[in-house]
Amino acid sequence: MSVDDGAVFDSGGLDQLIGVLRSAGYRTIGPIVSDGAIVYGTVTGVNDLPVGWRDHQEPGRYRLEQVSDAHLFDWAVGPSTWKSEFFTAEETVWQASIADGQVTFSEPDDDTGPVAVIGARPCELSALAALDRVLQGGAHPDDRYAVRRSGTFVVAVECGAPAGTCFCSSMGTGPAARAGFDLALTELFDGGHRFQVQVGSAAGAGVLAQVPHRSAGDGDRVARQETLARAEARMGRRLDTDDLPDLLARNLDHPRWEEVAERCLSCGNCTLVCPTCFCSDVKDATDLAGTVERQRRWASCFDVEHSLLHGGPVRPTTASRYRQWLTHKLSTWWDQFGESGCVGCGRCITWCPVGIDLTEEAAAIRTSAGALGSVGSVGRRTS
Ligand code: SF4
Ligand code: SF4
């Protein structure tokens, strides 16, 4: 199925698309406004979407405003990630109880049916692909994640309004959607409010066939390219990725790690909002009735216990934990998975309470590394 096939529908068509997916049994999850932010929740139609809402994002700052237009996707990603849907922040893995001398184990049945993702941004498609590789493609697949991901229908929406903290174009993950979707929409305004639709799978073609639409014309294609070009030009940040994995690996003792540690609170917010962070921990809870529960919850490399080995944590300082976070995303993820662990969504910058910006930190090391030379290094695998 070519992803170049073009169709067009208006916001009524999008409403019908959501209805078709719901009729087919999907839980339709998409962007909604809640508690002053655009987050992901159940959407039953276009009226649940953030109609007329715009966001303003800078390091450590997020603000929404509502304007009087019908734009549905004129904002960038908020604190929610699709990770939360498929790899939940906290869950019971198994339970055991004892009765009449017999121990019985059970696993909670949490198959809540297939999800239709509405409005995933291109950087989020890349983040989901990264999670798939880790949680489904590795030596130890996560069965729960696999069940929740199976049968997912993805309606992507390309970016027309990147935030001040976005840098997806530097990471090659946006603003255009290239893969990982069933349907990809581009919201267009010039010449009337409408969506140009690309088909990315046979399932997408089947659903689109149930929604009234027309074929895309040259005017629609030009409008899409102009929208993407504007988004590219408005990208809030850039990250020079040239030789970045090796540059960081050569500078593990750079003084910048101590400097950033003077501001870093070690709160872990950046890891919680990151769509690719996948670390988790387990703990067992017991009650007086003899029931045991194993619970899994997200973990953060900013937790001291995260690096606890015999004798104590191997990353006892904030500087060592921040270095672990940044170098894993931008350097050693390449060794593990052959790609970057950062998709350039900017969430860790916006939601850092003190506005620490990994693009700024990486640039500072690049700028000063030339003057200082390599400052501490490890050998990196090259394959
Ligand atoms: S490291 Fe930051 S910018 Fe990169 S994917 Fe994670 S949250 Fe987004
Ligand atoms: S970089 Fe920011 S969000 Fe991350 S742990 Fe430090 S203070 Fe918290």
Image: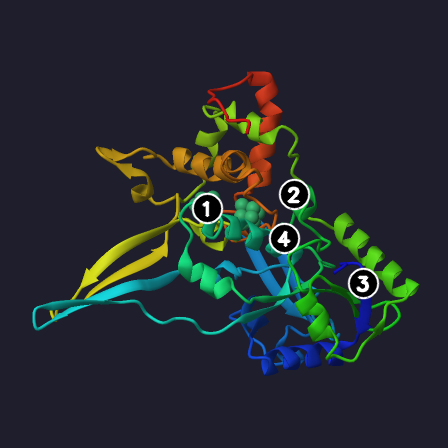
| Residue 146 seen in the current view | yes
Label 4 CB less than 8 angstroms from ligand 1: yes
Mark 2 or mark 1, whichever is nearer to me: 1
Q: Residues within 10 Å of mark 2 (few under 14, many from 20)?
A: some
Q: Earlier in the sequence, mark 1 or mark 3?
A: 3
Disc 4 target residue: 123
Label drawn at residue 5? 3
Three-letter amino acid code at the position of disc 4 = Cys
Residue at 57%, 34% (x, y): give it. Answer: 362
Looking at the rendered image, the quarter that the C terminus falls into is: top right
Q: Earlier in the sequence, mark 2 or mark 1?
A: 1
Mark 2 touches mark 4? (CB < 8 Å)? yes
Label drawn at residue 222? none
Residue 14, quarter of picture? bottom right
SS at mark 1 in the image: loop
- Give residue 174's position: percent from left, percent from top: 69, 51
Disc 2 target residue: 171
Alpha carbons under labels 2 and 4: distance apart: 9 Å
Looking at the rendered image, the quarter that the N terminus falls into is: bottom right
Please state if 91 lies on the left or on the right of 309 as rendered. Answer: right
Three-letter amino acid code at the position of disc 2 = Met
Q: Residues within 10 Å of mark 3 (few under 14, many from 20)?
A: some
Disc 1 target residue: 138
Q: Earlier in the sequence, mark 2 or mark 4?
A: 4
Q: Is residue 113 above or below residue 61?
A: below
Three-letter amino acid code at the position of disc 3 = Asp
Alpha carbons under labels 4 and 3: distance apart: 21 Å
SS at mark 2 in the image: helix
Q: Earlier in the sequence, mark 4 or mark 1?
A: 4
